[in-house]
Image: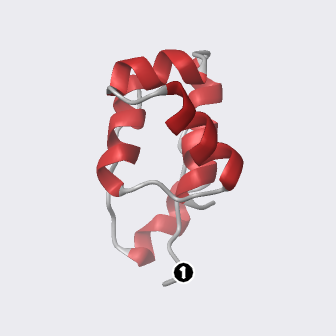
Amino acid sequence: MNANDAMRAMIEASGKSGRQVAREIGRSESFVSSTLAQGVCPRADTLARVAEACGYEIVIVPKNVAHNLADNSGRIVVEYDGR
Protein backbone atom coordinates (compact mmCIF):
# COMPACT_ATOMS: atom_id res chain seq x y z
CA MET A 1 0.00 0.00 0.00
CA ASN A 2 1.37 3.43 -0.85
CA ALA A 3 0.91 6.63 1.16
CA ASN A 4 -2.07 7.78 -0.92
CA ASP A 5 -3.85 4.46 -0.35
CA ALA A 6 -3.03 4.69 3.36
CA MET A 7 -4.46 8.21 3.54
CA ARG A 8 -7.66 7.02 1.88
CA ALA A 9 -7.88 3.98 4.18
CA MET A 10 -7.40 6.06 7.33
CA ILE A 11 -10.09 8.55 6.32
CA GLU A 12 -12.53 5.78 5.44
CA ALA A 13 -11.80 3.83 8.65
CA SER A 14 -12.27 6.95 10.77
CA GLY A 15 -15.81 7.47 9.50
CA LYS A 16 -14.97 11.12 8.84
CA SER A 17 -15.46 12.91 5.57
CA GLY A 18 -12.57 14.35 3.60
CA ARG A 19 -13.97 17.77 4.48
CA GLN A 20 -13.79 17.04 8.22
CA VAL A 21 -10.23 15.74 7.99
CA ALA A 22 -9.17 18.69 5.84
CA ARG A 23 -10.56 21.13 8.41
CA GLU A 24 -8.77 19.31 11.26
CA ILE A 25 -5.39 19.37 9.50
CA GLY A 26 -5.73 22.98 8.37
CA ARG A 27 -5.97 22.23 4.65
CA SER A 28 -8.67 22.90 2.09
CA GLU A 29 -11.21 20.26 1.20
CA SER A 30 -10.01 20.49 -2.39
CA PHE A 31 -6.47 19.64 -1.27
CA VAL A 32 -7.61 16.39 0.34
CA SER A 33 -10.00 15.39 -2.45
CA SER A 34 -7.52 16.21 -5.23
CA THR A 35 -4.69 14.41 -3.44
CA LEU A 36 -6.83 11.30 -3.22
CA ALA A 37 -8.31 11.58 -6.72
CA GLN A 38 -4.99 12.20 -8.45
CA GLY A 39 -3.16 9.45 -6.57
CA VAL A 40 -0.58 11.92 -5.30
CA CYS A 41 1.50 10.63 -2.41
CA PRO A 42 1.30 13.17 0.40
CA ARG A 43 4.35 14.49 2.21
CA ALA A 44 5.25 12.72 5.44
CA ASP A 45 4.08 15.62 7.62
CA THR A 46 0.73 15.73 5.83
CA LEU A 47 0.28 11.99 6.19
CA ALA A 48 1.10 12.29 9.90
CA ARG A 49 -1.52 15.04 10.31
CA VAL A 50 -4.13 12.94 8.53
CA ALA A 51 -3.21 9.97 10.71
CA GLU A 52 -3.65 12.05 13.87
CA ALA A 53 -7.00 13.41 12.70
CA CYS A 54 -8.18 9.87 11.95
CA GLY A 55 -6.99 8.32 15.21
CA TYR A 56 -3.81 6.73 13.87
CA GLU A 57 -0.14 7.38 14.40
CA ILE A 58 2.82 6.99 12.06
CA VAL A 59 5.41 4.44 13.17
CA ILE A 60 8.58 3.76 11.22
CA VAL A 61 10.08 0.30 11.57
CA PRO A 62 12.92 -1.57 9.86
CA LYS A 63 11.95 -3.36 6.64
CA ASN A 64 12.57 -6.78 8.15
CA VAL A 65 9.89 -6.03 10.76
CA ALA A 66 7.33 -4.33 8.51
CA HIS A 67 6.11 -7.53 6.83
CA ASN A 68 5.02 -8.88 10.22
CA LEU A 69 2.79 -5.86 10.81
CA ALA A 70 0.56 -6.36 7.78
CA ASP A 71 -1.32 -9.23 9.41
CA ASN A 72 -2.39 -7.27 12.50
CA SER A 73 -5.96 -6.04 12.44
CA GLY A 74 -6.47 -2.30 12.20
CA ARG A 75 -2.96 -1.49 11.06
CA ILE A 76 -2.19 0.17 7.77
CA VAL A 77 1.25 -0.65 6.45
CA VAL A 78 2.85 1.61 3.84
CA GLU A 79 5.74 0.15 1.93
CA TYR A 80 8.11 2.39 0.00
CA ASP A 81 9.65 0.85 -3.08
CA GLY A 82 12.18 3.60 -3.76
CA ARG A 83 10.20 5.42 -6.44
Tell me where residue 77 appears, x and y as whole percent. Answer: 53, 55
Q: Secondary structure at mark 1?
A: loop
Tell me where residue 49 appears, x and y as whole percent. Answer: 33, 36
Residue indicated by mark 1: 81
Q: In the rendered structure, which amino acid carries the disc numbered 1?
A: Asp
Q: Nearer the viewer, residue 21 or 64?
A: 21
Q: Nearer the viewer, residue 35 or 56?
A: 35
The residue shown at (34%, 73%) is 62
Tell me, yes or no, if residue 10 can be seen here: yes
Tell me where residue 76 appears, x and y as whole percent. Answer: 55, 47
The residue shown at (54%, 43%) is 7
By what rule are the colours in the image chosen?
Answer: secondary structure
Q: Would residue 62 be found to the left or right of residue 75 on screen?
A: left
Q: Nearer the viewer, residue 39 or 50?
A: 39
- Most distant residue in the right direction: 37
The residue shown at (54%, 67%) is 67
The residue shown at (42%, 76%) is 63
Q: Would residue 73 be found to the left or right of residue 27 on screen?
A: right
